[in-house]
Amino acid sequence: MRPDILNPLFAEVTALKGIGPGLAKPLERLGLARVVDVTFHLPTGFLDRVERDELFQADVGRIVALQLTPVSYRVGGSARTPARVQAVDGKGNHVSLVFFGGSSGWAKKLLPLEQPQWVSGKLEQYGDFLQIVHPDVLPLERASEAKGREAIYACSEGITSRRLGQLAVQAIERAPELPEWIEPSLKARQGWPEWRMALAAIHADPADAKARERLAYDEIFANQLALLLVSGAARAKRGRALQGDGRLRDALQLPYAPTGAQARTIREIEGDMGQVRPMLRLLQGDVGSGKTLVALMALLIAAEAGAQGALLAPTEILARQHFETLSRQLSGLGVRVAILTGRDKGRAREATLMGVASGEIDILIGTHAIFQQGVQYRDLGLVVVDEQHRFGVAERLMLQSKAQVPPHLLVMTATPIPRTLQLASHGEMDVSRLDEMPPGREPIQTVVMADDKLDSVVEALGRHLAAGKQAYWVCPLVEESEKTDMAAAEARAAELAMRFGDKVGLVHGRMKGLEKDAVMARFADGAHGVLVATTVIEVGVDVPNATLIVIEHADRFGLAQLHQLRGRVGRGGGVSHCILLRGKGLSETSRARLALMRDTNDGFVIAERDLELRGAGELLGTRQSGEQQFRLATPELMGPLLERANADARLLVDQDRALQTPRGEAARMALYLFERDAAVGLLRSG
């Protein structure tokens, strides 16, 4: 149970004054549903106002704040003409206050003639005159609100940055004084303020480096402590040794010999599974490096030892693909494989559940459905989690609760993880890397093209299809939006179908599972030559004859996601191609991202660079997938602070595993505050 002292922070955001249903909606769009979310919604920058008694030419380009008196109105003849209010300072210097897009009546109401007001905004030169466009205007008695430095917040339609700042002040007033969880000598050495003081300071002055550093450290420390408690609990419990005799693995007919990296990793896993201490291993492998074979070998070791294995996939498409691949490879070996997803109902589902409970099924593959309450295993010995970055600490605990003794756990990711993030998200795990490709995998030829070359790309697609090859065409949205110019999957599929007829298939996330599977099956069978898709094809889809992928608006995707998408081709030998279509007016970040994609196929290089360009939360897919993200710890702070936080968390766990000392109790509070409290339940047995 969360300590009562934190309840004011975890109240709904409507507990703050002035928030009704109208304001709750834009806050919800920003992910600010509770008071604590507002508290942790840190400013992204600040305005520095120069307070003046009069207007100076030298201040052009700066944000100024001063007393002005409106003296006349100049209103245009149409709605497109801006309203201008002429005003003077105390020395009689003139400035024009300009308002676009609003009615002139509003400007007159805001700035009545001959009534002094406090005005702030960016001073500009317009011909021979000075002007301020859309200034902030306040009565003189409220001048203090528009003086000095003002924090700037990320905001959404319906709420302003200033309003968010006012809500943050309210939220911090609800924040309690908390006991100190940072080791005292470290805090003193770094010169960090108290937790609540740091929170107030960063909202008042976003440039306060010590306050920002302190808050980032707190979040990283809580995360590291949670990971250590989870791994410690898993390793402290006795599992069971699973030692296979090799009969099933020897009988497996492989089209090629495993690479050196695969063989090494399989030996590491075999060694782990042969121990009483449960395996906790992360398998990193670039797109196409052969993780599925390693997972299959681990599942066969469990089957040889008489135990059951479970393979957890993040999407239904990937679960069904794993099921088909493993069923084909295990044909004739006497290993019984089944699939269970949220879509399976009725008798088929009941038969699968009975088979799992009785032990008739050796390997169960599926989505989260394979760990729901009604699923009982007779003897679960190994859990394999594919695309690990989509599952958090709480899910790992849920998996382990399904076995009589803690099962061995192998988690896999095709997103190569930089060392910093590896420690941040998987610090409790042993790590294996598949750092070489199976024979026949050639680098994918990547080109970047402007989207005005679309006709040429369609011509190239026609030649590609005429040669009997297949292609993916990826779009970032499902349907057109009034607020974006991104091409939509449905519209693109319709346009391509006018040229290529029923050779064009379409899949997107809003389609029903059966419908989606049917399209994917037609593409896999070759009935569709081109598959237009949203990023639903990002992981796991395997069609060897697909040797071209076109990605529209590639500048809108992150590097790791682009690398995942590109990995859908190049799976059948020979040369494959990736065309990245970009929009106009690229940012420097987008330009650097696309240049790197063109220049390298190395996922580990791409991952390190992506961390620099995008940030930790987005690299691991956390913004979309629901895994906890770091809200206070930016990538720039993660690097310097992570190893320190990890060492401090280890020291605390070594000295006080049950977190019962005064500092341990304070650290327990940090786990609740930063919502890493899935680990707190493990302390009772600590």
Image (cartoon, grey):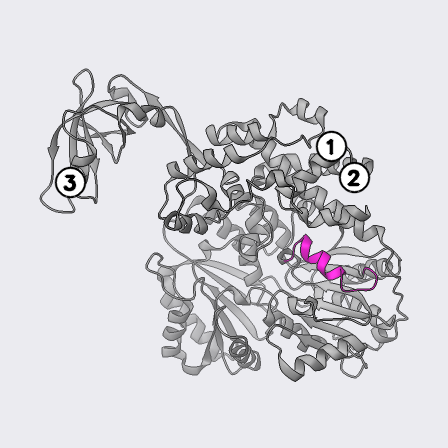
Circle 3 residue: 105
Identify residue type, mark 2. Answer: Val
- Alpha-carbon distance for marks 2 and 1? 11 Å
Compared to 314, does 681 lie above or below? above
Label disc, if present, on residue 663 of the rendered structure: 1
Label disc, if present, on residue 653 of the rendered structure: 2
Q: Residues within 10 Å of mark 1 (few under 14, many from 20)?
A: some
Q: What's the residue at 42%, 68% (across, down)?
A: 489
Between disc 2 and disc 1, the foreground one is 1
Compared to 2, does 322 lie above or below? below
Q: Residues within 10 Å of mark 3 (few under 14, many from 20)?
A: few
- Alpha-carbon distance for marks 2 and 3? 66 Å
Classify mark 2: helix, strand or loop: helix
User: Which stretch did the figure color magenta?
Assistant: 391-406
Identify residue type, mark 1. Answer: Arg
Q: Is residue 599 visible?
A: no
- Alpha-carbon distance for marks 1 and 3? 61 Å
**Whole-percent x and y of residue 384?**
73, 64
Classify mark 1: helix, strand or loop: helix
Q: What's the residue at 76%, 82% (across, down)?
A: 331
118 drawn magenta: no
Q: What's the residue at 11%, 41% (across, down)?
A: 76
Classify mark 3: helix, strand or loop: helix
Q: Which circle's residue, 2 or 3, is located before the other in the chain?
A: 3
